[in-house]
Amino acid sequence: MKVNKGFATLAALCASVFVVGTSEYLIAGLLPQIGEDLDVSVGTAGQAVTAYALGIVVGGPLMALLTSRLPRKGLAIGLMLLFAAGSAMSAISAVAPSFGLLLVGRVVSSLGHAAFLALALAMVTATRVVPAETTGSAIATVASGFTVATLLGVPLGALLGQGTGWRAPFAALTVLSLAGTVLLAAVLPRQEAPSTRLRDEIRVVTRRPVMLAIATTAVGFSGVATMFTDIAPLLTRVSGFSAAAVSGLLLAYGAGSFLGNLTAGKLTDKSMSATVRGVFGALAGTLLLVPFAVVWQSTAVAAVLVLGLLATATIAPLQGLILHHAGAAPDLAVSVNVGAFNLGAAAGSVIGGAIVAAGALRWTGLAGAVLSLIGLALTHLVLPRTRASAKDAAHEASVT
């Protein structure tokens, strides 16, 4: 019975994360339609993407602080309703054309997004819906909602938008958000409001191990983004694949990301330190080989598939690191770490774009490898090797 209840809780959180993740990435493919309907340039419409990212990076931690003393189940339901309200505002802006309303809707949704994802990951350990020794797998299960969103939610949402107008995907997200709210209300276990104070949350996030873990997330994830941002032109211009073939490879990449995330979760249960270091080491090696592998189509396919398996394999161990060091006050730390993933993606995109602009499209993998190696080096500071240091870290993680 307990296992079934734990499974239902993880499934509800995963489904809700799928809805939230679809919203984050969907709008990028709808910008031309949005610009035309609201009579703004595509560049201006792109501010909706920027506003959402800023809401996650800046607003997420603020929401975590403001809601740190609220009961967890009620907070999860409230955040999903907030997300649904933002999606509804975005949909309404197509009926009563207003780019300002669209921006407000995106910001409102982003606040619910960041705080809900942090809460969902923290609840995995706080509610003990799974045994402590399977926390890594549970984190990966919840986070897999994002990989499924990228693999299925975003393409299907874009297809719906192309066929019926860009309002339809946001309306669908609103309905799915409300359905997710009902599901959460039905299956989430009740949990008393945390006894931690605001200063506990702030003290935890400013600890050296937590700050290093967050830096590891940002730097390490930027290594993947540096190469992946321009993977389509790399495969068409250097490897010589057709646009249709690239679409198929990206689908395989997404499927690999789903499997890699779940596999890393199981490995994290066995050894968090070995998993995070192994993933970063493998990423660095693979990215280093990409500029040479893409010259031949057969090796390019192999490189894409391996990268797919590794790209999201950092999620479970890195979030596990945060939860390990955050102790009894994880909400703010996890929320900041969620923002670090977004910062890493943005930084990687900028670095990759600069390399491409310099005429070195083929060599973006080298920059990604350097960043992954920096992430690997940081893990040795976050996860000390000595037994004494490990005991000190465990003692420091408790919040009194």
Image: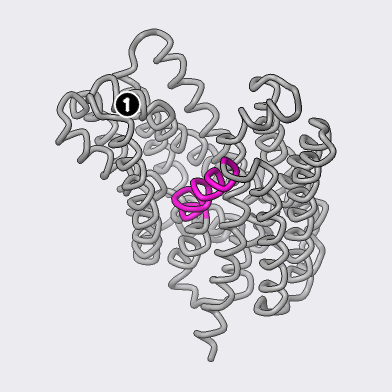
Residue 78 found in image quarter:
bottom right
Judging from the image, the colouring scheme is: one colour
Q: Image quadrant for the C terminus?
A: bottom right
Image-based side of 177 in relation to 238, left or right: right
Whether 149 is among the magenta residues is yes
**Majority secondary structure of the magenta segment?**
helix
On the image, the x and y values in percent for residue 388 come to 43, 56
Instruction: State the residue in front, 357 or 73.
Output: 357
From the viewer's perspective, is residue 238 above or below residue 343? above
Viewer can see residue 106: yes
Q: Which residues are magenta?
A: 146-162
On the image, the x and y values in percent for residue 239 come to 22, 25
Residue 365 found in image quarter:
top left
Residue situated furthest top in the rendering: 358
Whether 249 is among the magenta residues is no
Instruction: State the residue in front, 191 or 181.
Output: 181
Residue for point 76% across, 67% down: 194
Instruction: State the residue in front, 333 or 103.
Output: 103
Dot 1 falls on a residue whose secondary structure is helix
Image-based side of 131 in relation to 111, left or right: left
Residue situated furthest bottom in the rendering: 1
On the image, the x and y values in percent for residue 68 come to 78, 58
Residue for point 38% across, 48% down: 254
From the viewer's perspective, is residue 234 above or below residue 4? above
Instruction: Name the residue tied to disc 1.
Output: 365
Which amino acid is tagged 1?
Gly
Mark 1 closeness class: few <14, some 14–19, many ≥20 residues within 10 Å: many
Count the marks. 1
Viewer can see residue 393: no
Residue for point 48% across, 50% down: 318
Residue for point 68% across, 68% down: 179
